[in-house]
Amino acid sequence: IAAIMDFPVGTVRSRIFRAREAIDNKVQPLIQR
């Protein structure tokens, strides 16, 4: 991904991490029912 988008690896990792966190926050209420 980093090679294609020409981003530093750290930026890509932090974005993926934040995206995962956002998804987890949205999914948590659905799981906890």
Image (tube, rainbow, N blue to C red):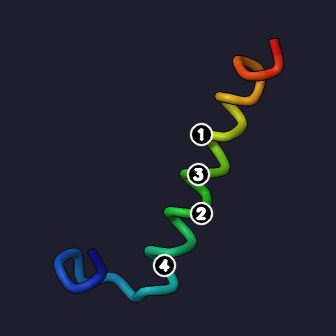
Q: Name the amino acid, label 3.
A: Arg
Indicate the position of residue 11 as horizontal and vertical percent values: 48, 78
Residue at the spot of label 3: 20
Q: Calculate the distance from the C-alpha at mark 4 to the C-alpha at mark 3.
A: 14 Å
Front: mark 4 or 1: 1
Dot 1: few (<14), some (14–19), or many (≥20) neighbours within 10 Å?
A: few
Q: Which residue is mark 2?
A: 17
Question: In which quadrant is the C terminus drawn?
Answer: top right
- In-front residue for pair 6/1: 1
Name the N-terminal-most of marks 1 and 2.
2
Element type at mark 4: helix
Q: CA distance from mark 1 to mark 2?
A: 10 Å
Which residue appears at 66% of the width and 29% of the height? 26
Question: Mark 4 = which residue?
Answer: 11
- Give percent across and percent down for residue 5: 22, 75
Q: Which residue is mark 1?
A: 23
